[in-house]
Image (cartoon, rainbow, N blue to C red):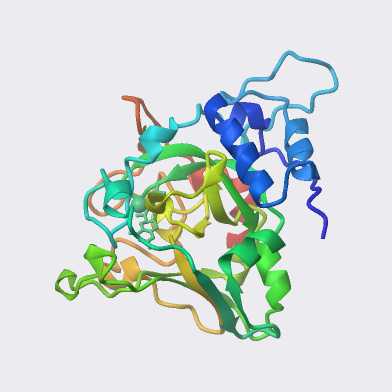
Amino acid sequence: MSFIHIPKNWEISENRATPEHAYLNRRRFLRKIGLTGLGVLAGSTLACGSDSDGNASPTGPSDPPPAPTYDPGRSLTPEQVAANYNNFYEFSFGKQGIGRLAEDFQTRPWQVEVGGLVENPKVYDIDDLIRGMPLEERVYRFRCVEAWAMTVPWTGFPFKALIDAAKPLSSARYVRLLTFLEPDQAPGQQPQSRLPWPYFEGLTLQEAANELTLLATGIYGHELPMQHGAPIRLVVPWKYGFKSIKSIVSIEFTAEQPPTFWNELQSSEYDFRANVDPAVPHPRWSQATELLIGTDERVPTLPYNGYGEQVAHLYG
Ligand SMILES: Nc1nc2c(c(=O)[nH]1)N[C@H]1C(S)=C(S)[C@@H](COP(=O)(O)O)O[C@H]1N2
Ligand SMILES: [Mo]
């Protein structure tokens, strides 16, 4: 398997994507998983042409033109801000301190079961999965349905790579994803929460196969900390954040549209599709703007969170 890839416009130069201190950790992390010296680093350093604010870089005539709809067009959210403002109801209904609440949670051994309507069902050990997949770093805007947003560098592999390995049958139309169920380790999953654990989500097969859809195993150049969904979580940047299910244990290919956690709890507020759309208010608040966490700045929300060029065709 080759890790060399053609850089896409959403990737930015890694020494811009990742703060200096994390850059070294990232080298260590990639070395640990056997990636340094391979094309993934060389590839991503080629992909400049605009800076993290979306401005054309003045460095030379050979730079590709800036691509405003792919480029995050925003500064990275500081790592410490993103790591202390989380939604992870398995641990808490609050947003802060989830890292501490989750610090004893065990993510090894960890298995991900891939099954359902596929030719190649398989139970992956997480470390074998990470070693076998083409890891890359991608900087994405991320928009929660609660009207806040962050911009973070994920490390992960395209969901498409897993689909290709699983070989869905022609009857497969959707994927259903499931989080762990460990009420002894995750206090939010105690029966008195009365929530329908474990957290479940779903995508159409086409959405899962889209070039943007990532299974993330790292953030800011190192492994995912627990509060961001270790050891593996979904990232679908054109959808509201609740679609991006954390700490996945099962991926099942199905013929029918799977039910989803928030839709089951409140169907009038959280639909299956959940594409970011500034023109459709949440029943209890506007979606026209979003707060950039760690700042006082509110900015306009973009249709498909600015990723229409990559995904609008999915919706006719
Ligand atoms: N298993 C699980 N996944 C989840 C959630 C959750 O509570 N449990 N919250 C979702 C919501 S509402 C958001 S906004 C994002 C937050 O991701 P972050 O904490 O990494 O920013 O995770 C999503 N994935
Ligand atoms: Mo969210």
Q: Quarter of the image containing the C terminus?
A: bottom right
Q: Quadrant of the N terminus?
A: bottom right
| 121 sits left or right of 247 in the view | right
The answer to which of 171 and 189 lies nearer the viewer is 189
Q: Nearer the viewer, residue 86 or 41?
A: 41
Q: Quadrant of ligand 1?
A: bottom left
Residue 180 sits above or below residue 215 on the image:
below
Quarter of the figure with residue 53:
top right
- x%, y% of residue 43? 78, 39
Please provide percent x and percent y for residue 185. 29, 66
Q: Is residue 106 above or below residue 165?
A: above
Residue 310: image x %, image y %? 65, 50
Of residues 215 and 210, the one drawn nearer to the viewer in this rendering: 215
Residue at figure coordinates x 69%, y 84% from the top left: 170
Quadrant for residue 89, please give it: bottom left
Residue 231 locus on image (x, y percent): 49, 59
Q: Is residue 57 left or right of residue 200?
A: right
| For residue 227, side relative to residue 74 (left or right) | left
For image coordinates 66% across by 52% down, the residue present is 33
Q: Residue 60, relative to residue 114: is it above or below?
A: above
Among all residues in the image, which is located at the extreme left? 192
Residue 252 visible in the displayed image: yes
Asked if residue 84 is positioned above or below residue 225 in the image, the reply reads: above
